[in-house]
Image: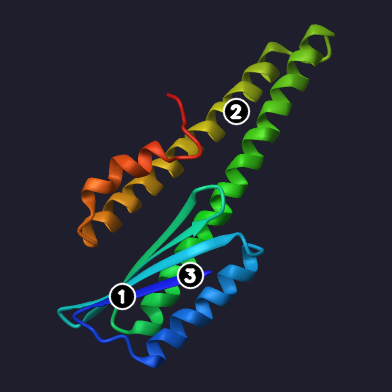
Amino acid sequence: MRLELRGHHVDITPALRRLVGAKLAKIEQLLNDRAVSVKAILTIEKHRHRANITLHARGEKFLHGEAETDKWETAVAKAWNDLETARQTFLLLESSIASAQENVRLQDLSFREGQATSLDVIDARLGLARAQIERSQSAYQFDLALAQLLELSGQTERFPEYLRRADRVIDP
């Protein structure tokens, strides 16, 4: 996996490179070698340490984490934790939607056979709608984080390109 480590108003020391590399190894292990590249931008602004980290995984999937604290260790750790949270949220929402779809199917069948009430069917459909809304909110948060990262790196003009390359599009 390729690591691009840049610093704004800070020199990238061997210690900083090791710190980011250690967190990278953990994420790489969790993703089972599906990670393609990582771009980490470390910045110091008014005595605050900011870490912006974007991970590109196979299938054109992107995870993003951002943190700002008084110490590099904390900022980098928080950014990596955000990436892991994004990965887990995505996986949980996909399985939640699949479970909710199956529940709707079963409740519809049960209703047709007289084993469930219309309220059971409505509850199942509401559960599916809830899971789909959460997924949409998650996608929005991801798009917002991507836009912020592109703005910080001076690449706002690339946002439409990322939208075109999206592997999943959530229809309204």
Asked if residue 16 is positioned above or below residue 101 in the image, the reply reads below
In the depicted view, which residue is nearer to us: 25 or 37?
A: 37
Which class describes the residues within 10 Å of circle 1: few (<14), some (14-19), or many (20+)? Answer: some
Identify the residue under disc 3: 2
Q: Identify which residue, 110 or 75, lies in the foreground.
A: 75
Q: Amino acid at mark 3?
A: Arg
Q: CA distance from mark 3 to mark 1?
A: 13 Å
Q: Tell me how the rendering is colored.
A: rainbow
Kindly identify the amino acid type of the residue bearing the numbered disc 2.
Leu
- Toward the front, the furthest residue is 2
Count residues near mark 3 (Cα–Cα under 10 Å), then give few for <14, some for 14-19, many for 20+: few
Query: In which quadrant of the rendered view does residue 127 lie?
Result: top right
Of the pair 104 and 62, the residue shown nearer to us: 62
Marks counted in the figure total: 3
Q: Nearer the viewer, residue 124 or 92?
A: 92
> Badge 2, how many Cα within 10 Å: few under 14, some, many 20+?
many
Q: Earlier in the sequence, mark 1 or mark 2?
A: 1
Tag 1 residue:
6
